[in-house]
C-alpha cells in the first residue's frame, strides 16, 4: 500500500495504490485533511488501487463531504478499476464513481 499526496499548483492529487484498509486509516485521514486544508481542488486517483475496505471507503466519502463543505472542488481522476468500482457500488458509495462534486 502506498498513499501519495501530489501538491500541484492548482490542485492536490491523492493517489491510493495497492490494498488500502483499516490499518492505514490514521495516515489516510491525515493525508485527506492536509490536502483539503490547502484549499486547492482535490482529486483522488484510484487507478492503481487493488482493494479498499469499508474504512477506506468511509474515509474517502468523508473527505469528499469535508471538501465540499470547505468549498474545495473534489473529483475522482483517472480510471477506476472494475473491482474497486464494484466494491464502491456494493457498499453504497457509487456517488464517488467518477462524480465531480463542487459546492
Image (cartoon, rainbow, N blue to C red):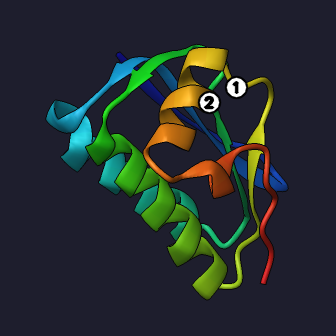
Count the labels in the image. 2
Quadrant location of the C terminus?
Answer: bottom right
From the viewer's perspective, is residue 34 above or below residue 48? Answer: below
Residue 34 showing in the rendered view? no
Q: Secondary structure at mark 2?
A: helix
Residue at image location 57% in from the left, 28% down from the top: 86
From the viewer's perspective, is residue 67 above or below residue 32? Answer: below
Q: Earlier in the sequence, mark 2 or mark 1?
A: 1
Residue at image location 63% in from the left, 50% down from the top: 94
CA separation, marks 2 and 1?
6 Å
* Foreground label between 2 and 1: 2
Q: Is residue 93 left or right of residue 25?
A: right
The residue lying toward the viewer, choosing from 47 and 40, is 47
Measured as percent of width and height from the top left, residue 29 is found at: 32, 54
Residue under label 1, please give it.
80
From the viewer's perspective, is residue 24 above or below residue 8? Answer: above
Quadrant location of the N terminus?
Answer: top left
Q: Quadrant of the rendered structure where residue 100 is? A: bottom right
The residue lying toward the viewer, choosing from 49 and 42, is 49
Q: Is residue 52 left or right of residue 79?
A: left
Residue at image location 43% in from the left, 45% down from the top: 91
Q: Is residue 34 left or right of residue 1?
A: right
Residue 4 showing in the rendered view? yes
Q: Quadrant of the rendered structure where residue 5 is? A: top right
Residue under label 2, please give it.
85
Do callouts 2 and 1 mark residues in contact (Cβ within 8 Å)?
yes
The residue lying toward the viewer, choosing from 8 and 70, is 70
Measured as percent of width and height from the top left, residue 2 is found at: 40, 19
Mark 1: give few (<14), some (14-19) or many (20+) Cα within 10 Å. some
Residue at image location 44% in from the left, 66% down from the top: 62
Q: Secondary structure at mark 1?
A: loop
Amino acid at each position: 500500500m502506498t498513499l501519495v499526496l501530489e501538491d500541484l499548483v492548482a490542485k492536490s492529487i491523492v493517489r491510493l495504490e495497492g490494498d488500502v484498509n483499516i490499518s492505514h486509516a490514521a495516515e489516510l485521514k491525515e493525508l485527506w485533511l492536509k490536502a483539503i486544508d490547502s484549499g486547492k481542488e482535490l482529486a483522488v486517483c484510484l487507478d492503481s488501487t487493488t482493494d479498499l475496505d469499508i474504512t477506506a471507503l468511509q474515509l474517502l466519502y468523508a473527505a469528499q463531504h469535508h471538501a465540499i463543505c470547505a468549498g474545495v472542488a473534489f473529483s475522482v481522476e483517472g480510471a477506476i478499476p472494475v473491482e474497486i468500482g464494484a466494491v464502491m457500488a456494493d457498499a453504497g458509495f457509487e456517488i464517488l464513481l467518477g462524480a465531480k462534486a463542487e459546492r
